[in-house]
Amino acid sequence: MGTIHHTDEEFQQAHQLMVRALCRISVTVLLLLVLLLTGCASLPSPTQRQASMALDGASTPLAQVVAASTPVAQRTRSGLRLLADGDHALDARIALIGSATRSLDIQYYQIASDAVGLRLVRELRDAAARGVRVRLLVDDLYAAGQDPLWAALAALPQVQVRMFNPLPVRNGGLVSRFALSLHQFERINRRMHNKLFIADSVAAVAGGRNIGDEYFMRGEQANFIDMDVLATGTVVAQLATVFDAYWNSDAAWPIEQLAAGGEGKLDELLQAAAPTLVVSALDRFGRSAVSQQLAAGQLGLSFAAVRVAADDPAKADGRADAATTTRAQVTLAMAAAQDELLIVSPYFIPGRGGMAMLRDAAGRQVRTTVMTNSLGATDEPVVHAGYAGYRHAMLKMGVKLHELGAMLSRKSSLFAKIGSSTGRLHAKVAVIDRRHLVIGSMNMDGRSERHNTEIALLIDSAELAGDVADLFHDDAHASSYRLRLSADEQRIEWLALDAGAQRLFTAEPGASLASGLKQALLVAVIDEDLL
């Protein structure tokens, strides 16, 4: 009778299954205790919500600037401008608010109550005072403690605020609100991750940025490297239709149904708003600020055909068709690559479908590069742990992997150093054959695929695709670790440029025994598609 030998990999898999089972039992017991101790909070009975639609802004001053910036031959296409620099991205939003005279439709996963977030709210207050209709839709997950702010804003004439898929617990911080709402986990796990900003129904900003200091290079500890696009022309009508669908969905609750009062309190709540905004003379593409161009009556735009991929808001209650999700449409576009594919995603867990797409691309000799965060740079280490399980297989199939380094990020052309802050990747971008460009809110992970609603712009422009590819390819060498397999292909090695010389790491940069144990425990208890 022969001896059965178990490999280290088999042992690790068995151990992981055991840990996962024990952790899930513990979490189930903890959840039951929480529910017994706190009872079950619930949302109030919904009342009838007034439907509304995008307003026609064709005769507004902003529409006149857009028309003056669009050659006659380009009027069937969309005008576009990349917003890679944080200061120019914030300037564009504030300038559009200041230029709007008819309507502002704004939809975000997160608006922080920090200097930048409050500055945006202050601008909305001032726009409403000029008679602009403001519709603001905010996902409720990160809105802990913000009920007074949104209630006060909604108390103004011309302003409506709605919270998407609200948690039943209104008081406390993020962790406590979520923990005490776990009896509705299947619902509250589904979040609106969209980022969309529309002014007068003629100009829009879409991309990866939430609203907060760190998304615009104003954070003290860390800042996000991100990407947006300013859009005009035919694509804006598509985006307005998407906004209306979310605004009028059953998941969008008027703040008045969730929080009482708010009249007369807004000015007090806005005292911490950023007083000034300094914008560099030119962005990295050599263009002046959007505020200056609007004042001059001429926007600098490129023109292209654009298609919007957006999840149905019904995805928030599990009713969306998996074949038509944003992730499905973007994956289909990437699968059509013939020569080169660049994927930039801060949270990258390809899953079975993503691995199949990458394997097919490798079989067709498509040069594929993935750029994501390193363990030291990510703000979601559990997601990184989920991604780490795919690295070896991707490297074996020939995928080039780059991981942004927390300190290396200061060398990034997309990162403006502020004091001792570090950089984190947050852009969600794909470049296909240097011809097609995808920019939006969607991460390449199971959460974006199955649970969060997302939106993306699929742009047919060799000019813009080339600009983005050049930016990230240059950054990949200067600001990230390049991963490779060891000579025996058993281990992963990290290479980084340090003072012009190449430095080799045989252990994961930024890892520690404690962090590794914490990640292992969390990954064991959390399904991959929830990361």
Image: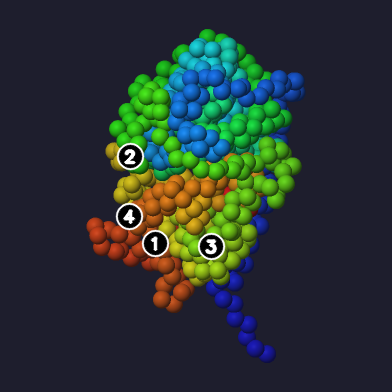
Which of the 4 quarters of the picture holds residue 108?
A: top right
Q: Mark 2 near mark 4, Cβ–Cβ under 8 Å?
A: no
3D distance between C-alphas at marks 3 and 1: 24 Å
Residue bearing mark 3: 338
Residue bearing mark 1: 482
Secondary structure beneath dot 2 equals loop
Which of the 4 quarters of the picture holds residue 315?
A: top right
Residue occupying image coordinates x 38% and y 59%:
481
Going from N to C along the chain, the mark reached first, 2 or 3, is 2
Secondary structure beneath dot 3 equals loop
If the image is split into quadrants, where does the N terminus sit?
bottom right
- In the figure, is residue 219 to the left or right of 108? left
Residue type at mark 4 is Ala
| Residue 466 in the image: above or below residue 165 | below
Residue bearing mark 2: 286
| Mark 4 crowd level (few <14, some 14–19, many ≥20, 10 Å Cα) | many
Q: How is the image coloured?
A: rainbow
User: Residue most toward the left?
Assistant: 499
Quick one: 167 or 203, which is closer to the camera? 203
Residue occupying image coordinates x 39% and y 52%:
470
Q: Mark 4 near mark 1, Cβ–Cβ under 8 Å?
A: no
Going from N to C along the chain, the mark reached first, 3 or 4, is 3
Secondary structure beneath dot 4 equals helix
Residue occupying image coordinates x 49% and y 57%:
433
3D distance between C-alphas at marks 4 and 1: 10 Å
Residue bearing mark 4: 478
Quick one: 297 or 255, which is closer to the camera? 297
3D distance between C-alphas at marks 3 and 4: 27 Å
| Residue 157 in the image: above or below residue 234 | above
Quick one: 230 or 141, which is closer to the camera? 230
